[in-house]
Image (cartoon, rainbow, N blue to C red):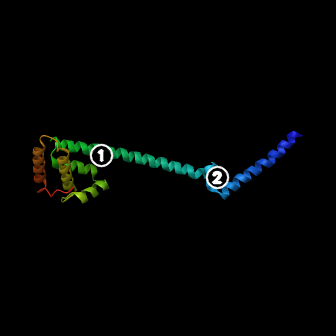
Amino acid sequence: MPRIRKLRVVSVAVPVALFVVASTAWADPLLAESMGLDVWEIGRLENDLKQANHETARLETALQDTQEIMVLNEMILRDVIDGRVELPAAAKRKWEANKYRKIIREHLDMNRTGANYEEKTAHDLYLRAIHESQKRADHDALCQRLRAEYQAAYHTLPELRN
């Protein structure tokens, strides 16, 4: 007899418990979510997770690209400062590497002067090289060399604008 009674209790308790859980979930979805009972959302949550993983991969790739271009830009600047590459050639190389970056074009438009982006890039490189080399013993000679290279390739250096 006790076994039949347990079955009756279970056969009544399980549907009642399911009804209470379903009613709670329907009445307060946030409570159901906080209790982990929102199983009907699994498909959407899996899609959200896939999208988040794709976005993470995209952002990691963008970060790596940005870091690589920053290293290249720094190498170009070092080559100009150390005299391994003349300013116009360095400006051309840097512009070719950065021309598809909207933020670079916006920076050049707002802060540098020149007839085209290559010239604006040369102006930017000139100013950055001057700034980066302030503590060098040959700073004045470097300024003269870069000014001469800029003016030979383009025209008189524009007024300083940071």
Residue nearest the observer in this picture, 107 or 58: 107
**Residue at (49, 50) in percent of width and height:** 51
Q: Specify whether 29 is left or right of 89.
A: right
- For label 2, the residue is 32
Image position, residue 91 (x, y; %): 20, 50
Disc 2 to disc 1, how far (Cα)?
Answer: 48 Å
The quadrant of the picture occupied by the N terminus is top right
Q: For the residue marked with disc 1, what is the amino acid?
A: Ile
**Residue at (87, 40) in percent of width and height:** 2
Q: Specify whether 60 is left or right of 39.
A: left
Image position, residue 72 (x, y; %): 27, 43
Q: Specify whether 98 is left or right of 86.
A: right
Is label 2 in contact with label 1 (beta carbons under 8 Å)?
A: no
Image position, residue 70 (x, y; %): 29, 45
**Residue at (10, 44) in percent of width and height:** 141
- For label 1, the residue is 69
The quadrant of the picture occupied by the C terminus is bottom left
Residue nearest the observer in this picture, 53 or 34: 34
**Residue at (24, 42) in percent of width and height:** 75
Q: Earlier in the sequence, mark 2 or mark 1?
A: 2
